[in-house]
């Protein structure tokens, strides 16, 4: 009798496990049909870094399309499906995805994703820079990815999560992360030496949005902006007046605009100070594959080059 009960119990367990597996397969197990780990990121820059580290074992997608505003986004049905199927959701944190309608939290709720389980912030461990503008003062400036040293932390955090979620390929992710971080460090060393050699008076980094605070910290530049973070009121007369007053009587060798933003506010600024617009920075998105900055590395290098050329222009 004991033996029969034992067999029945064993059968029940086998059936239950089989049923469980079927059910899991039904719902997606966080993997693509070819076995790659499904990973989504809140915007294109994080997604690109996850591709660099994840390589051939990761099926990576950005939720916010290239060029779309990740401060305030409206997910499509495809975004919802991809997020649902994802084993990992990478987010920036630091209030980046909290803007506007709170699109990110809504999407996580709809797709039943949870912090620490599927959702991971890639900025963990970064020493944040606080916003100073009334209304948002004291909150973290989210644009940490525009700093090169900070980018290394993004890569390390992404690798840590991939290694944990896909231990079979742990060595592969670790190796790629080490190589990628070394590549970013080399980029940092190169530009750090160049910026350090500039006269103190030329180290002003004037942009429209205050998206370059971390870059400025990395390279010893002083950041100026018209508005500090994208909101409903970008480039108001009072914001323009405040910047013009701060720069009055100063030597301003160059100013910069951001890709995807109208240059009108900066045109108004330079009409009141002696300067010019030296170029366009990619601050919130990588470009399409055929564009100027298809990778995060390209973006960092392009911004450094554009700023350096501007600050050394006659
Ligand atoms: Zn921004």
Image (cartoon, rainbow, N blue to C red):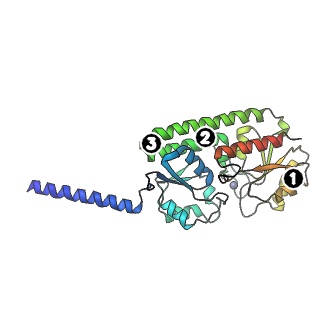
Name the mark on residue 169: 3
Q: Is residue 125 visible?
A: no
Q: Are marks 1 and 2 in contact (CB under 8 Å)?
A: no
Label 1 element class: helix
Viewer-nearest of discs 1 and 2: 2
Viewer-nearest of discs 3 and 2: 3
Looking at the image, the residue that sits furthest to the bottom is: 77
**Mark 2 nearby-residue class (10 Å; few <14, some 14–19, many ≥20):** many
Q: Is residue 278 visible?
A: yes
Q: Nearer the viewer, residue 271 or 250?
A: 271
Comes first in the chain, label 3 or label 2? 2
**Coordinates of residue 189 in the picture (x, y in percent):** 69, 33
Q: Nearer the viewer, residue 35 or 123?
A: 35
Q: CA distance from mark 1 to mark 2?
A: 35 Å
Task: Identify the residue at horizontal 91%, vertical 48% (top origin).
Answer: 274
Looking at the image, the residue that sits furthest to the left is: 1
Label 3 element class: helix
Circle 2 sits on which residue? 152
**Coordinates of residue 255 in the picture (x, y in percent):** 83, 48
**Coordinates of residue 150 in the picture (x, y in percent):** 63, 42
**Mark 1 nearby-residue class (10 Å; few <14, some 14–19, many ≥20):** some
Circle 1 sits on which residue? 244
């Amino acid at each position: 009798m004991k033996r029969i009960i034992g067999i029945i119990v064993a059968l029940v367990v086998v059936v239950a496990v089989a049923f469980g597996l079927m059910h899991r397969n039904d719902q997606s197990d966080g993997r693509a049909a070819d076995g790659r780990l499904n990973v989504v990121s809140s915007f294109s820059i994080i997604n690109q870094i996850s591709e660099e580290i994840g390589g051939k074992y990761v099926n990576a997608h950005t939720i916010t399309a290239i060029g779309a505003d990740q401060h305030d986004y409206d997910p499509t049905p495809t975004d919802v499906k991809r997020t649902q199927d994802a084993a990992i959701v990478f987010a920036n944190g630091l209030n980046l995805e909290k803007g506007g309608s709170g699109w990110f939290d809504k999407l996580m709720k709809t797709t039943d994703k949870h912090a620490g389980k599927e959702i991971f912030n890639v900025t963990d461990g970064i020493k944040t820079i606080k916003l100073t503008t009334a209304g948002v003062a004291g909150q973290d400036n989210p644009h940490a990815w525009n700093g090169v040293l900070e980018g290394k932390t993004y890569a390390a955090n992404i690798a840590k999560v991939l290694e944990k979620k896909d231990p079979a390929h742990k060595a592969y992710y670790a190796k790629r992360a080490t190589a990628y971080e070394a590549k970013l460090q080399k980029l940092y060393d190169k530009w750090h030496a160049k910026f350090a050699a500039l006269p103190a008076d030329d180290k002003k980094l004037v942009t429209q949005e205050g998206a370059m605070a971390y870059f400025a910290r990395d390279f010893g530049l002083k950041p100026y902006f018209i508005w500090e973070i994208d909101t409903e009121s970008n480039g108001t007369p009072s914001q323009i007046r405040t910047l013009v007053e701060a720069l009055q009587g100063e030597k301003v060798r160059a100013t910069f605009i951001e890709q995807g933003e109208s240059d009108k506010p900066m045109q108004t600024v330079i009409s009141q100070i002696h300067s010019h617009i030296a170029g366009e920075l990619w601050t919130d998105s990588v470009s399409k594959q055929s564009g100027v900055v298809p990778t995060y590395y390209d973006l960092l290098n392009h911004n450094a080059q554009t700023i350096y050329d501007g600050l050394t222009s006659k």
